[in-house]
Image (cartoon, grey):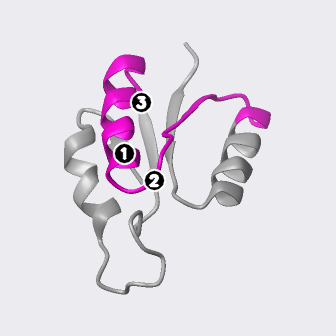
């Protein structure tokens, strides 16, 4: 069985790099799309619909410049049973 990984990253280049590397290493990769709340909602939807084993989640999904933004960490519990790193 191939491991399914969800990438949740708001920076397009970083997201693309993660997807490229994970696919190159043989994983089946899905990437959440959108900006802001749309990104968070798509991550939840994709986690459920693809039954991902693992999610690679950026800690700051709403604002990279806001040190108090912990939206990625808050999202993790919503992705269960997918394990997150």
Q: Which mark is residue 60?
A: none
Question: Dot 3: what SS?
Answer: loop
Question: In which quadrant will I find the C terminus?
Answer: bottom left
Point out the tag, 3 or 2, that comes first from the N-terminus.
2
Residue 65 drawn at (x, y percent): 47, 84
**Residue nearest the observer in this picture, 37 or 1:** 37
In contact (CB < 8 Å): disc 3 and disc 1: no
Q: Secondary structure at mark 2?
A: loop
Above or below — where is 25 with respect to 52? below
Residue 67, horizontal then vertical, whole percent:
37, 87
Gap between marks 1 and 2, in whole Å?
A: 5 Å
Q: Classify 10 Å Cα crowding around label 1: few (below 14), some (14-19), many (20 and above).
A: few
What residue is shown with label 2?
35
Q: Residue at x 21, y 43 (%)?
A: 78
Nearer to us: label 3 or label 2: 2
* Marks 1 and 2 in Cβ contact (< 8 Å): yes
Magenta stretch contains residue 24: yes
User: Which residue is denoted by mark 3 in the rendering?
Assistant: 53
Which element is circle 1 on? helix
Label 3 – label 2 distance at C-alpha: 23 Å
Using the image, determine if residue 56 lies above or below residue 43.
below
Question: Which residue is tagged 1?
Answer: 38
Query: Residue 6 versus residue 85: which sits nearer the camera?
Result: 6
- List the single residue furthest toward the top: 1
For image coordinates 71% across by 58% down, the residue present is 13
* Total number of numbered discs in the rendering: 3
Query: Which sits earlier in the primary sequence, circle 3 or circle 1?
Result: 1
User: For residue 3, what is the image quadrant?
Assistant: top right
What residue range appears in magenta? 23-52
User: Crowding at label 3, few (<14), some or many (≥20) Cα neighbours within 10 Å?
Assistant: some
Image coords of residue 69 (percent x, y): 31, 76
The label nearer to you, 3 versus 1, is 1
């Amino acid at each position: 069985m191939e491991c399914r990984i969800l990438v949740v990253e708001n920076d397009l280049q970083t997201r693309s790099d993660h997807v490229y590397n994970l696919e190159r290493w043989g994983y089946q990769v899905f990437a959440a799309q959108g900006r802001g709340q749309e990104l968070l909602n798509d991550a939840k939807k994709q986690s459920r619909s693809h039954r991902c084993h693992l999610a690679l989640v950026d800690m700051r999904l709403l604002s990279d410049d806001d040190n108090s933004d912990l939206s990625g960490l808050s999202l993790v519990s919503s992705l269960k049973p997918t394990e997150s790193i």
